[in-house]
Image (cartoon, rainbow, N blue to C red):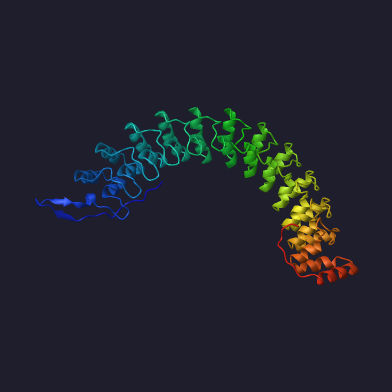
Amino acid sequence: MPYPGYGGYGGDMEPEEEGRPRHRCSRMMNARDGSPLHAASWGGHIDIVRLLMDHGADVNAKDERNATPLHFAAYRNHVRVMRELILRGANPEAKDVNGCTPLLLAADNGQLDAVKELLANEVYVEVHEKQGRTALMLAARANHVEIVEELLAHRADHRVMDKNGYTALHHATSKGADDVALTLMDYGAALDAKSKLGSTPLHVAARDGNAHLAAEYLRNGAKLNAKDSRSNMPLHLAARGGHADFVHELLKCGATVEPKNVNLSTPLHLAAFGNHLAVVRELIASGAGTECKDKDEWTPLHVAVSYNHLPVVCELLACGAHVETRNKAGSTPLHNTAWKGNTEVARALLVFGANVECKDRELCTPLHLAACNNHLDVARELLARGAKPTTPNKKGVSPIERARLAGHAEMVNELRSRMPAALASKVSASAAAQPDVTVGGSRA
């Protein structure tokens, strides 16, 4: 929460009626609505601070962010200025526009002496800013170990949660502040505290791949298979993030290898989605099945082909993934890749025996989908393996008809060239007799 430096202040001196100079600069405000006392406090100029207050400067004046001179002094760790301001009546609990008190700013900025001074003045240690973050949380996020220890010594409560349900330990974990996290653990911070989304500190470590902290949490009793609000376990999050070493450690500690979240997705689904080959290998080596299905009955292979992740596709196929597996729509992985148009993925599936004439629930073949979306190279691969341009779907529409309706002239010519001459002539005559209609690329 940085505050910009202030400088360049000056002021005219006018004689008072008695002939003595009156220092108007003590009440002047600059373009940012900060007084000279703010500037002197920012710079730590104790003598100027005293002079300004001796001439009537408002010790609790606020700039445009509602910050007082004490905010500035605390942020900059000017303890002598802080003492003088407090002695002259500065409010140590004043809040700026973000709800920050001087204590919160000092803790966030790593100003240990300022924190000690404020605590000595018995400020409220559990004060929080607009997001609900306390001084302990802000210091934890920034890995300010000594400040964390000072706050804990003054009975700061590590159980307090911010608006997202994060404790100080959640914050330390999310920022990789390992030293602070270990300190909080020494003070008894709850390892299984859950945020509003149900995340424990172990979930956060898994998301970010912090294997060192995870090992410490597990050693101290963190629940390995805790679920968040979407039923994700730490293994789900580590797999989704591609943290292979973390995944290995969780599995070694006994993590369930095939847990399902609210979408019935397993860690293998999420690793396939992210193209995380090392994680895919780790999970399969630990017993993850390649045929697990999510709520739409997609297998990891469906996921990998749909996002054109060729390395994962090849790994899954090599590990025995069923090339003809079907989802709720009756689509095989070859249907998915034909729709997406990845030629190399299609070729890999065909090498492993994918059926070019397999039909989904609408009786569409992969060639229907490639033709509709004008994926010419995929269509050529399918045709080379025996796909038929005239196979009708449930509505009686063939791949060549799909291409014609979509206005894909080159695709139509390619499909026609793979047909027997007599049949191609018949198709051409039929097309000439019909009005030219162009439709979008949605599946018929």
Residue 82, x across and y down, in percent: 30, 39
- Image position of 227 (left or right of 401): left
Q: Quadrant of the C terminus?
A: bottom right
Residue 15, x across and y down, in percent: 13, 54
- Image position of 304 (left or right of 118): right
Comparing 217 with 18, the one in front is 18
* Residue at 67% over, 31% down: 254
Residue 119, x across and y down, in percent: 35, 33
Residue 222, x across and y down, in percent: 58, 30
Residue, far left: 18
Comparing 161 with 135, the one in front is 161
Residue 219 appears in the picture as rendered: yes
- Image position of 303 (left or right of 110): right
- When asked about the image quadrant of residue 298, the answer is top right
* Residue at 81% over, 69% down: 431
Comparing 266 with 252, the one in front is 266
- Image position of 24 (left or right of 280): left
